[in-house]
Amino acid sequence: MILRFSGNRALVLGGTCELALALAHSMIESGLFPLLTYRDDKGLNRITEALRPFNGRYETCYLNFGDRDSLDSIFSQAGDDLDFLVDFAQGNYESLIAGADEECVYSYFMENVSFRAEILKRVGRAMLKKRKGRLVYVSSAAAPRPNPGQGFYAAAKLASEALYRNMGLELGERGITTVILRPGYIEAGRGRIYLQKQDRKILEMTPIKRAITGEEISQTILFLLSDSAAGINATEISMDGGLTSGK
Amino acid sequence: MDFLAELKKILKELLDFEEREITPETLLIQDLGAESIDLLELAVTINSRFKVAVKDDEIFLTRFRLYSREAEQQGKDAIHYLAGKYPFLGKDRIAEIMAHIKEGPQLKIKDLISYVTYPSQGV
């Protein structure tokens, strides 16, 4: 299947995670120009290392969730020239609800929900100037079905999903659409560490009896960014091998 | 810059209407039928065309009624209170809006011009 894209500049939030780097690879090979965000030197080095063969075909920029100045710097660097947004960024805060530290809770939601709303406002306004744009939010199967301890993570994910969904509802008629992807157990990044901790037994609960690969995720996101998927708007898609469909 | 001429051009593009009379007295919502998404796009266009930082709630007087109620509840002079919230509007214009507010949203082209030409709005 040949994928066609309306535009080529893609802001990738959380650009240092394994999935984002795999996606950046596929994007560059498909003629897109990713702008990957990082929040420290370690992340920047990871990007540089992973995308070494593609020098000059991507950019990086500093973005720290919660730091509004860093958001300004992205827009001074990228201007309003954005066609796509892929959002992998998500802080983790695991705690039982009744055991949570109040300060952590306030800052967690400020960073992962309020700040994301500000990003969406800025990106939405930039895309409105072109009257086109496509946004993909990478959520998680844990958003609708969290384990104990994942309450804050799930709440932030569901709130963020709601922001993306509404953006697609509100700006769809101006050519700006959104879609939410909910991967299940993934053979990459934090997912891989979790699977190792669980001795992979958890995959027995998944109808396909295996984890989703990073390559599958990046190819799916690429498809969701393409013109072929333009009719998928303001909705969420589960990519969890059937995990959350049964009990 | 002829702000009125420029705004007419922008509104024609955004609202996609045929030639029609637009004056400083034209009401954006009641006369031109602008909806919330049109106003959002107008704010974005004003920002880039006039190089003016736009706060949507301010330029479109979104909270005018709310502030008016606040002034009443706090026993304050409404015109003075609203002038603090909307420094780009003169007190006469605020009084005019208050007199007609029951007829529907009073946002006029001349209010947009006041906003973009108000000295502190430059980016």
Image (cartoon, rainbow, N blue to C red):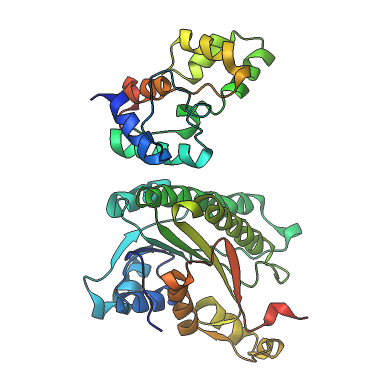
Quadrant of the image containing the C terminus of chain A = bottom right
Name above or below for residue B75 compared with residue A169. above
Locate residue A193, reporting x and y percent: 55, 81
Q: In front: A71, or A125?
A: A125
Q: Which residue is pictured at 47% across the width and 39% down the height? A: B38
What is the quadrant of residue B98 in the picture?
A: top right
Quadrant of the image containing the N terminus of chain A = bottom left
Name above or below for residue A204 compared with residue B59. below
Q: In front: B95, or A131?
A: A131
Q: Which residue is pictured at 49% across the width and 59% down the height? A: A177
What is the quadrant of residue A5 in the picture?
A: bottom left
Q: In front: B22, or B101?
A: B22
Locate residue B112, reporting x and y percent: 40, 25
Name above or below for residue A81 compared with residue A208. above
Locate residue A204, reporting x and y percent: 69, 91
Residue A66 in view: no
Residue A45 in view: yes
Q: Which residue is pictured at 38% across the width and 34% down the height? A: B11
Locate residue A227, reporting x and y percent: 42, 70
